Image (cartoon, rainbow, N blue to C red):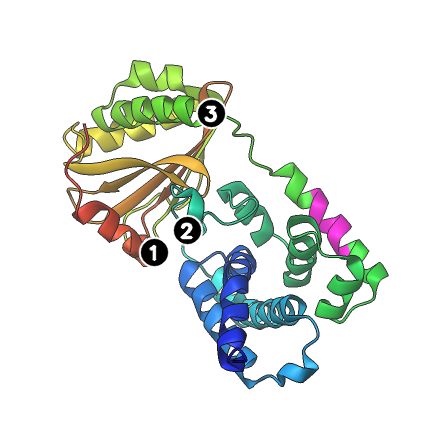
Amino acid sequence: MSPDPNTIHLTEFLSLRPRLFAVAYRMLGTVSDAEDIVQDCFLRWRQAQQDQVRDAKGFLIRVATNLCLDRLRAAKKLRENYPGEWLPEPILTDDPSERLDHDVSVALLLALERLTPLERAAYLLRDVFDTDYSEVAEVLRRSPAACRKLVARARVHVQKTQSRSTVSQTEGMAITLAFFRAARTGDTDSLSRLLAEGAQVTTDGGGKVIAARRAIFGREKLVRFFAGIARKQGGALPDVWRFCLINGLPAILSLEPIDGLVQATVLEIEHGRVCQVYIIRNPDKTAHFASELYGSSAST
């Protein structure tokens, strides 16, 4: 009995789904938008004349990339008018079976955000997903030479802002837990030891919740910043929180006692010290973490 063509058709798409999500997430920086793109890709896949699709992977990546480019152009004004600092929507990377292939660090996603949509697409296709320039040119409807220039410009920006965090998971967990306790209890001596001299904190509230509107630089300023928050919150740890990996980096998910929000605190660590702190408080970006906390008991 011959295999059902519809079953083969669906199986082929499902095998490529993780790659499509990976492309869309890096292009757009949000989970919900990436999932929408994957769903749109499936609809296009169902409508395609299968006898005319010689390369399913190439076809679907081309569709996903172009859908992302359209969405980026439409969202340009929204990003320009975003209240305060913008950080990508965080994703858990605890489970090795569910990790996205290649780098999904916050630093990379922020670097991609500073590129033009075409630079972003060209860089991802070529340097992240190892696509030949001839295929990149076909996807972007540009010449291979033009695509090489796009990638070259993108590399300059990305290399300037690459994540410096190379800490092991064991060390990363120890430093993250120590930092979290020091920040929440207002332990300024420990904070001074844990923070690098040029450390930076970036907070994303999306204009919906309290958050620092601008990035804060320098160890002394960060110590005062976290000590001030600790005083306002009573110098205690939240009842519900957990260590995890977010976008490949050590992080803490917490249920904030004052406003009931889920908060993600993500760290970059270099040479045993915290050099970057990303705090995502925008409820639109952290709501999908609720199930990770509501069913858990308080961490200790």
Amino acid found under the numbered disc labelled 3: Ser
Does dot 3 land on a helix, a strand or a loop?
loop
Tell me the quadrant of the picture where the C terminus can be found: top left
Q: CA distance from mark 2 to mark 1?
A: 7 Å
Does dot 2 land on a helix, a strand or a loop?
loop
Residue named by callout 2: 84
The answer to whether 269 is drawn above or below residue 80 in the figure is above
Query: In the visual, does 267 lie left or right of 300?
Result: right
Q: Name the mark on residue 207.
A: 1
**Lower position in the chain sequence, tag 2 or tag 1:** 2
Residue 27 appears at what percent x and percent y?
A: 56, 59
Q: Name the mark on residue 168.
A: 3
Q: Is residue 211 visible?
A: yes
Q: Which residues are magenta?
A: 150-156
Q: CA distance from mark 1 to mark 3?
A: 35 Å
**Which residue is at a point 50% across and 80% down the rendered structure image?**
4
Residue 18 appears at what percent x and percent y?
A: 50, 58
Packing grade of label 1 (10 A; few <14, some 14-19, many >=20) is some
Instruction: Confirm whether the magenta stretch covers residue 155.
Output: yes
Residue 176 appears at what percent x and percent y?
A: 35, 27
Residue 54 occupies which quadrant of the picture? Answer: bottom right
